[in-house]
Amino acid sequence: QVQLVESGGGVVQPGRSLRLSCAASGFTFSSYGMHWVRQAPGKGLEWVAVISYDGSNKYYADSVKGRFTISRDNSKNTLYLQMNSLRAEDTAVYYCAKGGGVWGQGTTVTVSS
Amino acid sequence: DVVMTQSPLSLPVTLGQPASISCRSSQSLVHSDGNTYLNWFQQRPGQSPRRLIYKVSNRDSGVPDRFSGSGSGTDFTLKISRVEAEDVGVYYCMQGTHWPLTFGGGTKVEIK
C-alpha cells in the first residue's frame, strides 16, 4: 500500500541546518508532486513547500523562502527538505504528503539552544 | 496570501446528530482551469492528517459517505450527517488554488 516514512528530525541549535527525508513506496513516486507541511506544538497545519513530479517546479511558504530547499531523487523514491538557518519558530512536526492525499507519520524538529 | 477562516472553533456534538463546519476564503478559489481546489482534512488525536474531501465535494477512497462537502467561490461547508465517536478530532480546510497554499485554523469536533 502507499506509504510515506519521514526521517531526519531531531534537536538542533538556532542557526544550524538539518535535512529531512521522506521515503515513498507503494506508488509511482516519479509521477506525483510532493509537499512538506508542518505543525508547531499545539498549533494548526502550515504548508511549507511543494515540488513537481520531475523536480522542475518548486514553491515555498514565505516563512521558509531562502532558508529551506525542497528536492527529490526519483531513482531513490525519496523526497528531501534541506533546512538552513533554523529558528525557534521552525520547531514542529514535519509531514510529507503525496499530492495532499496521503501523509506520512511525521518527524519532529526542535530548534533550541 | 489567501486567508482561510473556519467556524466554529469548537463544535460539541451529540452522537448520531449532524455537524457542519464552515470555511470562507478571502478570495475566490476558482482556478483559471475551472476547478476549485478546496480540500478538507481530518486529524484525529495523536494521528497524522488525512484528506477527506478534494475539489469541494469529492470524497477520498475509504471516507464514509456521512461526510460531504459543498460550496463555491469563497464559501464552503463540510457536513457530517450523523456523528460517530471516531469522528472526534480537528478538521481543517485548505485551498490549493493560489500560491502559497493555505489552511484554515481548524475546528475541533468533540462529543457532548
Image (cartoon, rainbow, N blue to C red):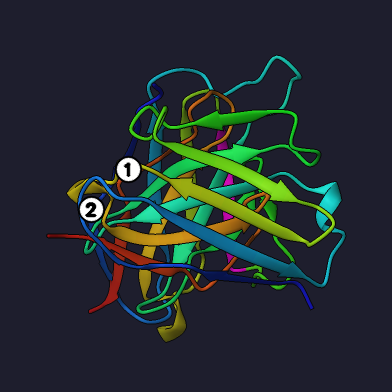
**Callout 1: residue from which chain?**
B
Indicate yes or no whether the magenta region holds residue B5: no
Q: In the visual, does B68 lie left or right of A112?
A: right
Vertical relation: B15 (above or below) A52: below
Amino acid type shown at disc 2: Leu
- Evaluate if marks 1 and 2 touch, with contact meaning CB atoms under 8 Å apart: yes
Label 2, on which residue? B9
Mark 1 crowd level (few <14, some 14–19, many ≥20, 10 Å Cα): many
Place of residue A106 in the rendered image (x, y in percent of width and height, measured from the top left): 47, 69
Q: In the visual, does B74 lie left or right of A64?
A: right
Q: Which mark is residue A51?
A: none
Furthest residue to the top?
B32
Place of residue B68 in the rendered image (x, y in percent of width and height, measured from the top left): 59, 56
Vertical relation: B89 (above or below) B21: below
**Magenta highlight range:** B66-71
Q: In the visual, does A56 lie left or right of A41?
A: right
Amino acid type shown at disc 1: Gln
Label 1, on which residue? B6
Picture quadrant of residue A52: top right
Q: Secondary structure at mark 1?
A: strand
Place of residue A15 in the rendered image (x, y in percent of width and height, measured from the top left): 24, 45
